[in-house]
Amino acid sequence: MAPPKKLVCDRCGLELTNKDDIELALEGAEAWQAAVWARGDEPRGLFPCENYKSCGGEMKPFRGKGIFRRGGNTN
């Protein structure tokens, strides 16, 4: 599986698109998720958001399949 093209915060919408930043987040994902499990919560993402203190969000992979798509209504 190819690495995601960007990571997006599930709370504030911050986007990481730099390849090096994404690779660093993926490398630390297991440690982040273990820390979340250790405090009794369930991880929602791969890594904490840069704004975690204020938004509490976690970074999730985004592969371009969002709710907004091109094209008109097919009804």
Image (spheres, rainbow, N blue to C red):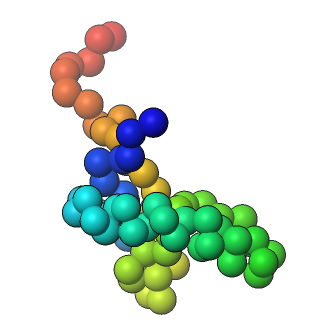
Residue at x 29% of width, y 11% of height: 74
40 relative position to 47: left or right: right
Residue 72 rendering spot, x and y as whole percentages? 20, 19
Q: In this view, does 4 lie above or below 36?
A: above
| Quarter of the figure with the N terminus | top left
Depth check: give the residue in front, 48 or 69: 48
Identified at 52% across, 70% down, the residue is: 28
Q: Is any part of residue 58 visible from this angle?
A: no
| 27 or 62: nearer the viewer | 27
Left or right: 11, with 39 as reference point? left
Left or right of residue 69, residue 59 in this image = right
Residue at the limit of the structure toward the left, as seen here = 71
Question: Residue 12's quadrant in the figure?
Answer: bottom left
Q: Quadrant of residue 68?
A: top left
Quarter of the image that includes the C terminus: top left
Q: Out of 75 and 59, give the one closest to the viewer.
A: 59
What residue lies at 55% left-to-right and 65% top-to-bottom? 29
- List x then y, in percent, for residue 57: 49, 72
**Residue 63: image x %, image y %?**
35, 41
